[in-house]
């Protein structure tokens, strides 16, 4: 397997990135809400295809207010759209960052786990051959697989 994560992330870079993310969270916190699953599912969703329609409706509600029903808060509509546009400008790069972080941590974790299994299998073989010092390490490491039970030959 190719070792794609063949570097050590400097502590200063990880700390600085975490600090910037925490600053963004603190900055945006007063403007963010949380929805439960039912609330999220019940809401009509804005998408890239819907946004132009919403923008046109907002434009028309400002240029031709006589067609807006009295219960429509046009100023609230304008504020909602303004917030959506600004928050989407933050969300899109964050989504890209999350995807890249997820891919990178998945790869790094896979490479780490593969290396650990390689070491474990080497220790296991050494213990079978009664190489001094290997049995204690093998007994300690094999606890990870104790609850898995016997494996079939297909695995």
Image (spheres, rainbow, N blue to C red):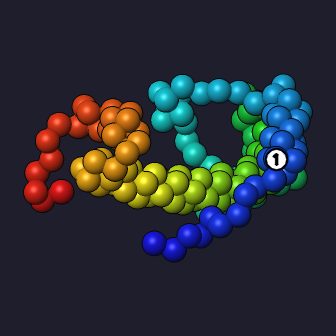
147 or 80: nearer the viewer: 147
Q: Residue at the front extreme?
A: 132
Q: Which residue is mark 1?
A: 11
8 or 28: nearer the viewer: 8
83 or 128: nearer the viewer: 128
Where residue 7 appears, as percent x and y from the top left, is 71, 63
Q: Check the image and report above or below for 123 versus 144.
A: below
Where residue 147 appears, as percent x and y from the top left, is 25, 31
Mark 1 is surrounded, within 10 Å at the Cα level, by few (under 14), some (14 to 19) or many (20 or more) other residues, namely: few
In the rendered image, which quarter contains the N terminus?
bottom left
Q: Residue at the bottom extreme?
A: 2
Task: State the residue at coordinates (17%, 37%).
Answer: 149
Count the marks: how many? 1
Where residue 103 appears, as percent x and y from the top left, is 57, 59
Q: Visible in this render: residue 34? A: yes
Where residue 131 appears, as percent x and y from the top left, is 34, 50
SS assignment at label 1: helix
Q: Visible in this render: residue 110? A: no
In the rendered image, which quarter contains the C terminus?
bottom left
Q: Check the image and report above or below for 64 versus 52.
A: above
- Report the side of 151 relative to 23 (left or right): left
Task: State the residue at coordinates (84%, 25%).
Answer: 30
Task: State the residue at coordinates (51%, 59%).
Answer: 111
Q: Check the image and report above or below for 73 versus 104.
A: above
């Amino acid at each position: 397997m190719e070792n794609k994560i063949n570097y050590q992330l400097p502590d200063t870079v990880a700390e600085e990135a975490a600090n910037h993310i925490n600053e963004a969270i603190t900055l945006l916190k007063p403007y963010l809400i949380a929805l439960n699953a039912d609330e999220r599912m019940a809401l009509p969703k804005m998408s890239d295809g819907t946004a132009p329609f919403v923008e046109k409706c907002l434009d028309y509600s400002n240029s031709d207010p006589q067609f807006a029903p009295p219960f429509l808060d046009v100023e609230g509509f304008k504020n909602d759209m303004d917030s959506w546009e600004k928050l989407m400008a933050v969300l899109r790069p964050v989504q890209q960052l999350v995807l890249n972080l997820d891919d990178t941590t998945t790869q790094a974790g896979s490479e780490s786990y593969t290396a650990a299994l390689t070491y474990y299998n080497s220790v296991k073989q050494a213990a079978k051959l009664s190489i001094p010092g290997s049995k204690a390490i093998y007994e300690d490491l094999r606890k990870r697989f104790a609850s898995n039970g016997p494996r079939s030959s297909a695995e």
